[in-house]
Amino acid sequence: MRFYTVHIQPQKSGQKDLVLVKEGFSWPAFLFDVFWAVHHRAWLTCGVLTAAICVFCIIGYWQVIAAPLLLVVVLGWRVAVGFHGNDWRRTELARHGFQAAGVVSARDYVSAVQRFLDKSVDRSSLFLDAGS
């Protein structure tokens, strides 16, 4: 079972946006750090990740530390990004007006959304109606 945090953003029209973020390690953030941040529109995180990559490139170019040690440092950085990626995503959602609405456990994302909607009291205002 995986745990997901539920984030809701009320819209002006009375509808709400719903986003679930998985708890734990983020493989996409580990493998594609800057592209992952751009995909999630986490611009501050994207800037930090880009700056870190630039620093690692400068260190490698000027050979400030030995190449094997630089490889270990970069790998450690990427592991840290993987572990903190989903937390940074939650912070970015909060900056955009999303409010934490709870935690849901399920085997996958779709089941987590379904479980949250089943337990939600006012499901009618979460999404736009098909007729409107």
Image (spheres, rainbow, N blue to C red):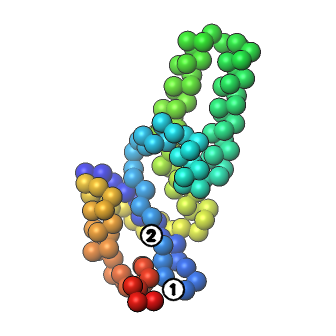
Q: Residue at x 69, y 36 (%)?
A: 51
**Cα gap from disc 1 to disc 2, whole angstroms:** 13 Å
* x 51%, y 68%: residue: 99
What crowding class fits label 1: few (fewer than 14 Cα within 10 Å), some (14-19), or many (20 or more)? few
Q: Residues within 10 Å of mark 2 (few under 14, many from 20)?
A: some
Q: Position of residue 71 (x, y in %)?
A: 55, 18
- Give the amino acid at mark 1: Gly
The mark found on residue 14 in the picture is: 1
Q: Which mark is residue 1?
A: none
Name the residue carrying label 2. 18
| Picture layout, residue 92 above or below residue 76 | below
Query: In the rendered image of this protein, does residue 6 appear above or below residue 61?
Result: below
Residue 43 percent location from the top left of the image: 65, 52
Name the secondary structure under disc 1: loop
Q: How far across and down, in percent of the image, does residue 97 sit?
A: 59, 69
Return the residue nearer the eye: 11 or 36.
36
Is residue 109 rendered to the left or right of residue 66?
left
Contact, CB < 8 Å: mark 1 with mark 2? no
Residue ID at (68%, 44%): 47
- Amino acid type of disc 2? Leu
Q: Along the horizontal axis of the image, is 32 left or right of 102? A: right
Instruction: Kindly state the secondary structure of the residue where label 2 is placed.
Output: strand
Expressed as whole percent of the image width and height from the top left, the position of residue 76 reads: 52, 26
- Residue lying furthest top: 66
Q: Nearer the viewer, residue 101 or 123?
A: 123
Residue sitting at 48 percent across and 49 percent down?
86
Above-or-below relation of 96 to 36: below
- Quarter in which the C terminus is drawn: bottom left
